[in-house]
Image (cartoon, rainbow, N blue to C red):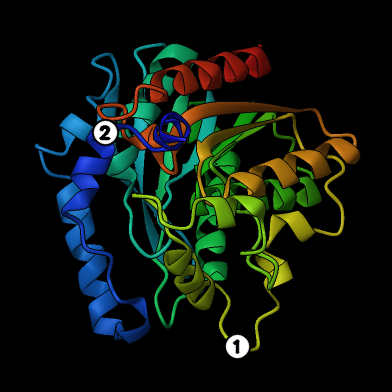
Amino acid sequence: MRRTALSQQPPLGLRLVYAVRKEPDYRTMSPADLTALGETANRIVTSRLARLMTGLPHSGVTISWQDVDLADRTIRVRVYRPQSTGKLPLVLHVHGGGYVGTAVQCDWINSHVAARVSAVVVSVEHRLMDHDTPLAAIVDDGWDVLRHVYRRAADWGIDPTRVAVAGESAGSMVAALSALRARDAGMSLRAQVLVNPCVDVTSTALDYDSMRQYPNTPTLTLEGMEFFRELAVPDGTDPRTVSPLYAATLAGLPPTLIVIPTLDPVADHGRAYAERLDQQGVSVAVSEHPKAGHAFISMPGLVRQARPARDRIVQFLCERFR
C-alpha cells in the first residue's frame, strides 16, 4: 500500500515547492482579489529564480513581444523565431491558467519547439478570465490572432500551408476551439497539440474518474476547477459552446496529439476527447506520462517527464510539417 501510494504522487521537488503555496479561498474572492492573484502569480513565474522551475529557453531562438492590432483591440503575442531562413511553419500557441498565466511561463517548451521543428511559434497573451471576462473572450483572442497571422503570412515570414495550433490546459480548450473555427472557415491546419487539456465546462466537467482520484494535486485542485467553471461560463451562457468535447461534429479536424499526465484531475478530459476524435475519423495519438501532474510541461526543472513529452511534440509536428 505504501509503495502504491508513493507511486501516485507528483515528484518530491514539485510537492515541496507547492507545500508553501496556500490555496486561495476562491469562494470569497472579490474581483480585486482575483486580479491581485493573477498579478502575483505572473510576477513569480516571470522572475529569474523561476527559471529553475520553468526551464531555460533554447539559445538558438530569438524571443520578442509583438502587438497584433485588431479592429477593436490589441493583443500582445510572444514570438519565438529560430535561426532558419525562408518561409517557416507556424505554431499558434495558447498558454494555460485561465484566470492566471502568461506566455512567459512557456518559454522553455515554445523555444525548443521553434528550434527543433524550425517553426515560428506565436504564443497569445490573451485576456485572463475574471468576473467580467468569460472563457469565450479568451477563445476569441486565440482565434483572432490565428486568423490575423494566417492572413498576413508574408509579413510574418510563415508558410500558410503549414500551420498548427497548440495549447496547454485552458489554452488547449482555446486551441481546440480555434481548430474547429478554422475548419469551418476553410483554413487548413496540419495539426493540433493539446497538453493536459480541459475540454468540458458543462455540468459533467467534474464527473470524471480522474477528478475523483486526484482532487487535490499541487498544480490543480477540484476547488480550483469549480472556480474556473464559474468564471468560464457565467449564468445564461451555454457551456457547450466553449466545450470542444460537445462540438456538434469533430470530423474534418487535423491530426491531433493529446499529451496526458496521469496524475491530473483532467486526465480523463483528454482521454474522452481522444476517444471522440477517433470515433469521428480524426487521426489522434495519445501520449501519457506516468507520475506527471497537471502543467508538467511548463516545469521541466521539477518534472523530468517534461522532456520526453517535449520530444514527442517535436516529433509529431516535424512529421506533420513535412
SS state under label 1 = loop
For the residue pair 110 and 245, the one nearer the viewer reads as 245
Residue under circle 1?
A: 235
Q: Is residue 161 left or right of residue 172?
A: right
**Mark 1 near mark 2, Cβ–Cβ under 8 Å?**
no
Q: Residue at x 79, y 44 (%)?
A: 186
Picture mark count:
2
Q: Residue at x 40, y 19 (%)?
A: 307
Q: Is residue 53 left or right of residue 70?
A: left
Q: Residue at x 86, y 59 (%)?
A: 248
For the residue pair 295 and 94, the one nearer the viewer reads as 295
Quarter of the figure with residue 278: top right
Of labels 1 and 2, the one closer to you:
2
SS state under label 2 = helix
Disc 1 and disc 2: Cα gap in Å? Answer: 40 Å
Q: Residue 221, how many percent across, how many down? A: 43, 59
Instruction: Check disc 1 and give the amino acid type.
Output: Asp
Q: Residue 291, how many percent across, how many down? A: 45, 30
Instruction: Check disc 2 and give the amino acid type.
Output: Leu
Q: Residue 166, how many percent across, how many down? A: 55, 38
Residue under circle 2?
A: 12
Label 1 neighbour load within 10 Å: few <14, some 14-19, many 20+ = few
**Residue 87 seen:** no
Q: Residue 66, how many percent across, how many down? A: 32, 45
For the residue pair 130 and 302, the one nearer the viewer reads as 302
**Residue 301 seen:** yes
Sequence-earlier tag: 1 or 2: 2
Examine the rendered structure and indicate whether residue 185 appears above or below residue 28.
above
For the residue pair 234 and 62, the one nearer the viewer reads as 234
Q: Residue at x 57, y 13 (%)?
A: 315
Examine the rendered structure and indicate whether residue 187 appears above or below residue 118.
below
Quarter of the figure with residue 6: top left
